[in-house]
Image (cartoon, helix red, strand yellow):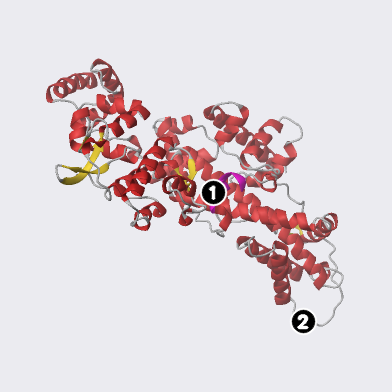
Amino acid sequence: MPRRASYSLATVQALPAQTAYSSEAATRRQIDAAEELIPTIDARADYALCDALQRIFGTEIAAAAGEIVSGRALRADLATLVLELSARVTMRPDERAGGSATPEALAREIGVASKTLQRWRRAGLCAHWVLDHGRQRVEIYRACLERFAAQHPSEFARARSFRRFDADERCVLLAEARALLEGGISLNLAAKQLGIRFHRSHEGVRLLLLREFGARPSARRGAGEQALRLVERAWRLGVDPARIAQRIGRSESLVRALVDRRRGELLRGVQPSWVELPTFDLPGADETIPSAPSVRRLQPLGLADGEVIAMIASAREIRRLFARDARAANERDETRGAAMHYLLRRASRAIDALPRWPDRAAVDQAETDLRAALRLRALLDERGLVIALGRADQAFDGGPERLPADELRALVRELTRAVQQVVLNFDPSRQRFDRAISLAADYAIAKLTPSRRPARAAARHATGIAMRALGETAQWQGIVDPMSHHAALVAAALPRGPLSAAARLVARRHGLCGLPPRTVEQLAGEDRTTVALMSKRLRDAENAVRAAARARAAGA
């Protein structure tokens, strides 16, 4: 008897216990409804679990409310649920057309391995507890197998056509392979030629040759830690993977795989924190939250940074311009805060799921989510510092610029720290952003300026007070945001000039100049080109921006 499949969804796993006292007729209806639902489930789509279970049990399952599950997990768990429910009723072999048989017997009958049937059970092939010759055991109805074969014809045909190498065929094949290898042909090319000659798959012959001749299954294992760091560093500097491959004496595909592996390792060290909100688990949250207008438009307020007196003046001007926009600003802050936490959560879960050799698209998506979260955090930091400087205006007669330079720097530094802490822990469901910032700013000002302080003359600042308050918003920003220090150059090159096209592409990719960050696949889709061509265009654009930055630095 095959091992009974385990559940992956806790809500579905609890259903048999909750329906333990259902009648046999009701249980049969539930089994039939589940078997009718399974073929309609797309493994690549997401489903509301409550709706799916309501179609089976005829009533709303409270525990499943708001839970969104993948079609692959739902399909597998429903097949397991059918098996478990069938143990409560008396099912006989002849009650369905074609009868039933054990998985082992049925596997021999159609010419596949019994493990193949076990794998198909996770793909929706239903098995049942059947009372056969006075003994209850797990069997599969031939009608169920025929329906599964009709829904998965290519997979069914491929499994039935698979056959192992017999002794004679293996001996002849290895003899010819040895002759080809001694003649200087690579193992991969020999496997391809022998596969055509013996009507075998290229991969099957290649693996046989690897096992026989002792070659390593993958050249990736030969890459050391030093090569890994070198390859990833060169890639980040814009070096063509083909040149990197020539430099280290490896293939270009290996270089790209090494880059993706190193990117995955760096992402595992990020470990972002976020605030969990109840809206994150609602149906469609993955599309609605990151697609809100205030999340897609990332235009900063324009707070001057780099000189303290100019920053205070620009903060006053921003508050004057947006004095009547308080309600809209609060809604915008809440939306951006929720989206920031959601993107951090989604990226963190994607990073946890990355294998040792991750998929390039998955790594790119995680980096893009983290980059978008950084842009939202920077906007909230800027908005919070404008509010905090307004509290400082109210706390000091004549404004905070009357303070000595050292005290003014300390004040702005403490206000920035307080604002960043509020943004990091901002919960839109429980607090208003402006009130939380104002309270934190008041605490910071009170800590730096005791209530009993002797009055003194205002300080005179003949020259500006250099200080940059809004820098990196997270310690791991350098890992996912390598072009952020070129933001000013990109913004200056956008309107016109020879660098305009390159700057626009870099801005779209990295989320500069108020644009949301995009993955390479998204850029390729928008420009109607391939991912490979878009990657090359992007690398050339980033190198053009770097070259312009070096030329500017040399000219200065």
Looking at this rendering, what residue extends furthest in the top direction? Answer: 197
Q: Tell me if mark 1 has few (under 14), some (14-19) or many (20+) residues whose alpha carbon lies within 10 angstroms of its own.
A: some
Residue at left 43%, top 30%? Answer: 252
Q: In this view, does 378 lie above or below 516?
A: below
Contact between labelled residues 1 and 2, with CB atoms less than 8 Å apart = no
Q: Mark 2 points at which residue?
A: 451
SS class of the residue under badge 1?
A: helix
Residue at left 62%, top 31%? Answer: 526
Disc 1 marks a residue whose amino acid type is Ile
Residue at left 33%, top 32%? Answer: 148
Is residue 403 rendered to the left or right of residue 212? Answer: right
Q: In this view, does 195 lie above or below 67?
A: above
Residue 166: image quadrant is top left
Depth check: give the residue in front, 101 or 411.
Answer: 101
Q: Mark 1 points at which residue?
A: 479
Q: In this view, does 146 lie above or below 342?
A: above
Depth check: give the residue in front, 237 or 477.
Answer: 477
SS class of the residue under badge 2?
A: loop
Disc 2 marks a residue whose amino acid type is Ser
Please provide the residue range marked out in magenta: 281-290
